[in-house]
């Protein structure tokens, strides 16, 4: 009895200390349960040797408790967070993520295509690297339309950003980058601490030597009333889940005996605002889901009450693709009973109707139309995020109202040490006339021979790679077309006409995953080279040694339904131009599998496609 009392006393006396740390409590709790459940066995097996072993174990637990208590102190302690210094307004500067003070500081904002591509190509350990993003995963956005119907599961499209950071030995903070102080080289970070303390937002600064802004863009409503309140978007994993849940809600409500015929038709009217790749692929996926899966469970509803309408402001859907592809997609949609309304501009979105105005109304027909809907998916463009708006307003060189302006090396205009890439950035318009005037001053000649014309054209392409498509090879035949007076020389007026023609055909790079991925890989290569030389020489080295970014287009895919896809190759393989049908569908799937960031997501997506073929799509609401 005395032995049992001593043992119980020892355990109870240690309980408060052990409870101070989760780790020690995990060690202590099973031992206590075992002890109280078998006290008689403990008494009989007790011996001096066992008491010694017990003393060692309890001593180790106590040490573990003390160490854990020391390491688990409150997170707001500036010393433990490495925030000994403060920035503007007394906000602390976080330095706890800096692993080697001798290495430069690289901060990456975002976890999308541009940021992920950069992290995959960055040399491990070359920088003290910090990634800041409110989403702790990379999302394979091209397959989001498939996630809305269950062709692929949402988890299959996501890869942990911490797993990606691990390869390059980078630190990750799940937080919002609120603003950038380009003068002090500080990023203001905002953390939503609603889990710990409701409605409290903590802020801290992060220093950098090089900053990469790859925050992407947000949906653009163009100021149309009711869009934000009544439409579903398709840009994030939450959007895809919301669309999937709402779609099944509408079908279940339409199947109830209390639902009238008018209500059924309204509930099952699906409207897609925007005829670009995302809108077209969502409409195609929805049509497949209806006619391959839901028709088995809601046959009368699918045959009699469902309608799909795509509203497009241009003359054709997929208007950035070749005309042949647009016409092929429209024919496919017609066979699938998808109504395509072109040359129409949405004017208002109400809670259950959408209003649009026809640019070319039929004779005697209405100009404005109001269409009832159960769900409206808005997919008509992108706009700037709050942080990019703040950057634009704080830097005088930023004159673009739609994206951050960068030079051909992706450096932010007016922001030393800052790069921007992906959807949030656009490359500045080439200063071609300035280069031509420099050539005039250098040579002192106003008339150019073919050799001088070719020399200037090659220099333009080298300095501004985006002009390569329009300047072509600058053959003698091109020179003859520009030589309007056929005197074998180009005068200033003829050269100006040539430059104006090139400028009129220049367009910004499309905000696609392909562009952002190439920009991220390019910037990683540049940063790898900079890490090998002294920091004071970086700017000079970038200007003289590093080549400008050059985008290489590999074609554009779009799924159009019923195992058919389109592949636009007009700027890649001119002799082919495009590929349509089932062949393009298999190329599309193979390309998307090869573009996965990990073997894990590649396997998951492949399994999802096989599962869909064997068992169909899941129709439960999740």
Image (cartoon, rainbow, N blue to C red):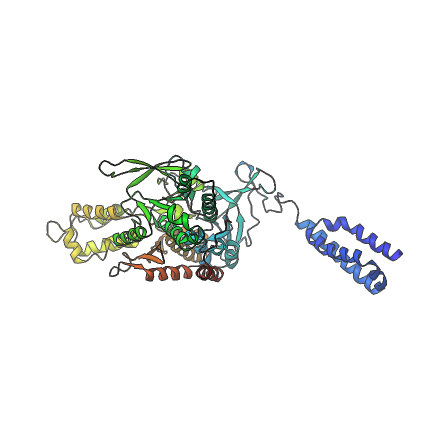
The N terminus, quarter of image: bottom right
Foreground residue among 288 and 170 = 288
* Relative to 437, residue 477 above or below: below
The residue at 48%/47% (across/down) is 245
Foreground residue among 146 and 504 = 146
Residue 353 in sight: yes
Q: Position of residue 472 (x, y in %)?
A: 23, 56
The residue at 33%/62% (across/down) is 583
Q: Position of residue 618 (x, y in %)?
A: 48, 54
Q: Position of residue 395 (x, y in %)?
A: 40, 39
Residue 394 in sight: no
Foreground residue among 268 and 612 = 268
Quarter of the image where one finds residue 488: bottom left
Q: Position of residue 577 (x, y in %)?
A: 26, 58
Quarter of the image where one finds residue 368: top left
Residue located farthest toward the right when viewing the structure as drawn = 2
Residue located farthest toward the front when viewing the structure as drawn = 257
Q: How many marks?
A: 0
């Amino acid at each position: 009895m005395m032995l049992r009392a001593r043992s119980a006393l020892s355990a109870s006396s240690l309980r408060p200390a052990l409870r101070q740390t989760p780790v020690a409590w995990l060690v202590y709790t099973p031992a206590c349960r075992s002890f109280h459940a078998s006290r008689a066995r403990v008494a009989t097996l007790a011996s001096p040797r066992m008491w010694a072993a017990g003393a060692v174990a309890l001593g180790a637990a106590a040490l573990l408790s003390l160490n854990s208590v020391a390491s688990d102190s409150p997170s707001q302690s500036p010393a433990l967070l490495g925030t000994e210094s403060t920035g503007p307004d007394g906000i602390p500067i976080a330095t706890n993520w800096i692993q080697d003070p001798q290495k430069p500081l690289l901060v990456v904002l975002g976890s999308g295509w541009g940021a992920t591509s950069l992290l995959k190509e960055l040399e491990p350990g070359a920088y003290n690297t910090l990634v800041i993003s409110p989403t702790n995963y990379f999302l394979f956005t091209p397959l989001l339309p498939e996630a809305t119907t269950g062709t692929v599961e949402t988890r299959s499209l996501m890869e942990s950003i911490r797993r990606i950071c691990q390869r390059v030995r980078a630190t990750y903070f799940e937080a919002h980058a609120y603003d950038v102080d380009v003068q002090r080289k500080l990023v203001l970070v905002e953390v939503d601490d609603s889990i710990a303390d409701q409605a409290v937002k903590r802020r801290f600064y992060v220093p950098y030597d090089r900053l990469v802004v790859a925050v992407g863009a947000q949906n653009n409503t163009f100021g149309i009333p009711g869009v934000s309140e009544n439409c579903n978007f398709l840009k994030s994993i939450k959007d895809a889940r919301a669309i999937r849940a709402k779609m099944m809600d509408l079908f279940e409500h339409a199947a109830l005996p209390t639902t009238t015929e008018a209500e059924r038709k309204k509930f099952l009217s699906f409207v897609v605002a925007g005829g670009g790749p995302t809108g077209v692929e969502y409409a195609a996926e929805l049509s497949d889901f209806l006619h391959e899966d839901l028709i088995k469970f809601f046959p009368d509803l699918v045959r009699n009450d469902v309608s799909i309408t795509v509203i497009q402001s241009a003359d054709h859907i997929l208007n950035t693709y070749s005309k042949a592809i647009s016409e092929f997609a429209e024919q496919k949609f017609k066979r699938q009973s998808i109504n395509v309304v072109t040359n129409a501009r949405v004017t208002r979105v109400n809670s259950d109707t959408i209003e649009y105005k026809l640019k070319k109304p039929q004779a005697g027909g209405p100009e404005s139309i109001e269409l009832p809907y159960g769900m409206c998916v808005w997919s008509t463009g992108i706009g700037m995020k709050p942080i990019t708006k703040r950057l634009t307003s704080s830097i005088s060189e930023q004159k673009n109202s739609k994206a951050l302006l960068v030079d051909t090396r992706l450096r932010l205009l007016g922001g030393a040490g800052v790069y921007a890439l992906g959807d949030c950035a656009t490359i500045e318009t080439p200063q071609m006339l300035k280069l031509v005037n420099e050539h005039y001053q250098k040579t002192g000649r106003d008339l150019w021979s073919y050799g001088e014309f070719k020399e200037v054209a090659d220099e333009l392409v080298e300095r501004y790679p985006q002009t390569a498509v329009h300047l072509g090879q600058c053959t003698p035949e091109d020179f003859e077309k520009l030589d309007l007076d056929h005197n074998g020389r180009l005068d200033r007026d003829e050269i100006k006409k040539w430059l104006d023609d090139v400028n009129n055909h220049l367009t910004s790079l499309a905000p696609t995953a392909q562009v952002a991925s190439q920009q991220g890989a390019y910037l990683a290569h540049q940063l790898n080279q900079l890490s090998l030389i002294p920091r004071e020489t970086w700017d000079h080295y970038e200007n003289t040694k590093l080549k400008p970014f050059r985008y290489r287009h590999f074609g554009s895919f779009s799924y159009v339904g019923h195992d058919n896809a389109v592949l636009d190759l007009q700027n890649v393989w001119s002799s082919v131009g495009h590929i349509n049908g089932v062949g393009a569908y298999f190329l599309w799937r193979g390309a998307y599998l090869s573009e996965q960031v990990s073997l894990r997501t590649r396997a998951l997506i492949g399994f999802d496609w096989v599962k869909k073929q064997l068992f169909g799509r899941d129709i439960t609401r999740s």
